[in-house]
Image (cartoon, rainbow, N blue to C red):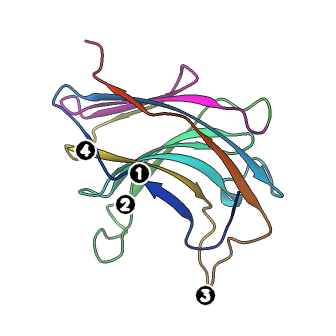
Amino acid sequence: MQIFDNPKHLLACKDPIPIPDEGVLIETSLGAEVLRAPEDSWDAGFASFNLMDFEHGLVLDGLATSRRTAILFERLHIPGVIPDEPAWTALADGPLSPKPGTVHDYRFLYEPKARRVQGWIDGVPVLDFRGVPFRINSFLPGVGLITLTKIRDGKSRSLRGQGVAGTFGPVHTGRPAL
């Protein structure tokens, strides 16, 4: 269990997943139980599976709370590197969990030639993002226990007695079916 305060808890693999011209299919499983907090609030905390592209500041994430699932595709605002103006977030809600800790299957497809990212949760299409602005060359996979509560007045507001228990499955990669 991770008790929150800034910074959050994020573990990244040392080796990235290279992306060939025909694209890549990435599958994993993820579940979460948020403790002592509203189970439907992203601000209280969530477990995440992360596919990070540090070259362009892009992330493609699977998210889970006790009740909610989602896929997030985002160009991060990174002070001094990526200004706030070209940053954006696409958050697509997925199926609800029948109970806290339910493990869900996540599937991500990136097709560089089509400039398209798609995502499914438990076989349900959730995200279809067209017009990816950059050719992503690799994703660095990771997992995290995160809260979206922003720092205000130079102080963290993340810690309110809550925590998250996350369940992370193996990661499988392959080429998309033609």
Considering the numbered disc 1 on the image, is that residue within a helix, a strand or a loop? strand
Depth check: give the residue in front, 139 or 59. Answer: 139
Which dot marks residue 7?
none
The numbered mark, 3 or 4, whose residue comes first in the sequence reads 4
User: Quick one: which residue is furthest to the right in this view?
Assistant: 36
- Residue 118 location, x and y as percent? 40, 30
User: What kind of element bears circle 3?
Assistant: loop
| Residue holding disc 1 | 74
* Neighbourhood count class around disc 4 (C-alpha, 10 Å): few under 14, some 14–19, many 20 upward: some
- At label 3, which amino acid type do we have? Asp
Q: Are marks 1 and 2 in contact (CB under 8 Å)?
A: yes
Q: Earlier in the sequence, mark 3 or mark 1?
A: 1
Mark 1: few, some, or many residues within 10 Å (few <14, many ≥20)?
some
Residue 59: x and y, percent? Answer: 39, 50
Residue type at numbered disc 2: Ala
Q: Residue at x 25, y 12 (%)?
A: 178
If you read the primary sequence from the N terminus, does the residue marked by circle 4 or circle 1 appear first? 1
Residue 87 is left or right of residue 127, and the answer is: left
Measure the alpha-carbon separation of dots 4 and 2. Answer: 20 Å
Q: Identify the residue under disc 2.
A: 87
Q: Look at mark 4 in the image and give the residue it sits on.
A: 138
Q: Magenta: predominant secondary structure element?
A: strand
Q: Which residues are magenta?
A: 100-125
At 39% across and 60% down in the image, what residue appears?
76
